[in-house]
Image (cartoon, rainbow, N blue to C red):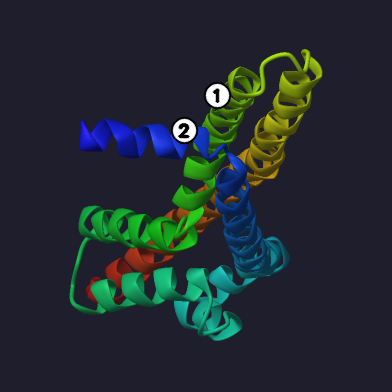
């Protein structure tokens, strides 16, 4: 019964505290959106710029392609790992397995904290709805406690309670939009990196065969 009384106290307190939770969610979401978009766009823009040049560099050899890449770039990490595998005598199939592993790691790094956006996008409206329900409960409780004052009392309470739902939707919309945008951009980045990786493997394999051919 004590637990029931505690729950009643929460319900009758209204949903104003839910607004503060949603405000915290909004600050968190904005921080994640800005941080992820900067990183993902930087990677995407660099790849779009350098990939056409890499096609020509690959014709000159794998080392020339490596020199053309920034050392902190996703493509460099992919190429460096493949080059190390080739130096150890790995064949095309082994290099492809290393490529898949490296791309999985890079995808995980790019998708870091995007789960927060997906979670907030799915659940912020329900948090706002909780605030509205609690506000409605309080409004009817106040109406019962002030009998004879007319429906204006409950109408005012309900209108205030609906603000929580509106805030929840307001928080969810940019989260969902940003989450979808980032997922699409990351997918494109990985596809381009995978295409480059297979080109690099072909060049490395050709170099290995040339080096191992009898003179």
Residue 137 placed where, x, y %?
55, 24
Residue at image point 78% right, 26% down: 156
Helix, strand or loop for disc 2: helix
Q: Is residue 48 above or below residue 81?
A: above
How many badges with numbers are in the image?
Answer: 2
Graded by Cα atoms within 10 Å as few (under 14), some (14 to 19) or many (20 or more), the crowding at tag 2 reads: some
Whether tag 2 and tag 1 are in contact, CB under 8 A, the answer is yes
Residue found farthest to the front: 148
Residue 13 placed where, x, y %?
52, 40
Q: Is residue 7 above or below residue 56?
A: above
What residue does disc 1 label? 137
Residue 99 placed where, x, y %?
33, 59
Residue at image point 60% right, 55% down: 29
Residue 115 placed where, x, y %?
45, 49
Residue at image point 71% right, 28% down: 157
**CA distance for labels 2 and 1:** 7 Å
What residue does disc 2 label? 11
């Amino acid at each position: 019964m004590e637990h029931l009384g505690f729950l009643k106290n929460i319900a009758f307190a209204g949903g104003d505290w839910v607004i503060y939770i949603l405000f915290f969610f909004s600050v968190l979401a904005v921080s994640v959106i800005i941080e992820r978009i900067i990183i993902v766009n930087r990677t995407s823009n660099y790849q779009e710029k350098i990939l056409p040049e890499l096609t020509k560099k690959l014709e000159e050899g794998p080392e020339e392609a490596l020199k053309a890449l920034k050392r902190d770039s996703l493509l460099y990490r992919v190429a460096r790992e493949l080059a190390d595998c080739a130096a150890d005598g790995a064949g095309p199939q082994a290099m492809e397995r290393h490529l898949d592993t490296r791309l999985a790691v890079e995808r995980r790094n790019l998708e870091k904290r995007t789960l927060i956006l997906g979670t907030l996008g799915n659940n912020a409206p329900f948090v706002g709805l909780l605030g509205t329900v609690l506000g409605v409960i309080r409004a009817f409780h106040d109406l019962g406690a002030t009998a004879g004052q007319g429906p204006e009392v409950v109408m005012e309470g309900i209108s205030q309670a609906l603000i929580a739902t509106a805030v929840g939707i307001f928080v969810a919309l940019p989260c969902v939009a940003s989450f979808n945008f980032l997922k699409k951009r990351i997918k494109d980045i990985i596809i381009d990196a995978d295409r480059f990786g297979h080109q690099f493997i072909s060049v490395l394999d050709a170099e290995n065969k040339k080096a191992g051919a009898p003179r």
